[in-house]
Amino acid sequence: YNSLLLLAEGERLEQVMAAGSGEGFEAWRQLTMQSKPRIAAIKTTEMKDLLSFSFVGELSERLLAFDLALRSYQEHHQKLVDLDVVAGVVMNNSDDKERSEE
């Protein structure tokens, strides 16, 4: 409870205080329940960005940029993206001209 009091600000601080003295777990539960929809929306948006990644331009540069974006997503969400999904994104989002040249 005391740690949350020190770390929280504004509306979040009011929520911690409303939980009551010594009710740190309850305050934490309320704070996380309120944040879950926002976290899910962020995760969905980041996955959507990854799935629609553009490979237009210099393919080697775009592949490196995609790899960086993929690693960032996986580290941030502590979840591996299936290799079949990665391959599908690359094949689906790269130019037909670029695919025929390789």
Image (cartoon, rainbow, N blue to C red):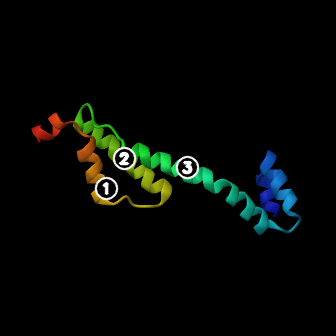
Instruction: Report whether residue 9 is seen.
Output: no
Using the image, tell me which numbered label, if any, was put on residue 34: none
Q: Report which quarter residue 55 is drawn in.
A: top left
Furthest toward the left, the residue is: 101
Instruction: Report whether residue 19 is seen.
Output: yes
If you read the primary sequence from the N terminus, does the residue marked by circle 2 or circle 3 appear first? 3
The picture places residue 99, in percent across and down from the top left corner, at 15, 40
If you read the primary sequence from the N terminus, does the residue marked by circle 1 or circle 2 appear first? 2
Vertical order, 77 against 59 (above or below): below
Mark 2, residue position: 51
- Badge 3 local density, few (<14 within 10 Å), some, or many (20+)? few
SS for callout 3: helix
Mark 3, residue position: 41
The picture places residue 7, in percent across and down from the top left corner, at 76, 53
Mark 1, residue position: 85
Image position of 68 (left or right of 37): left
Residue located 17% across and 37% down the image: 96
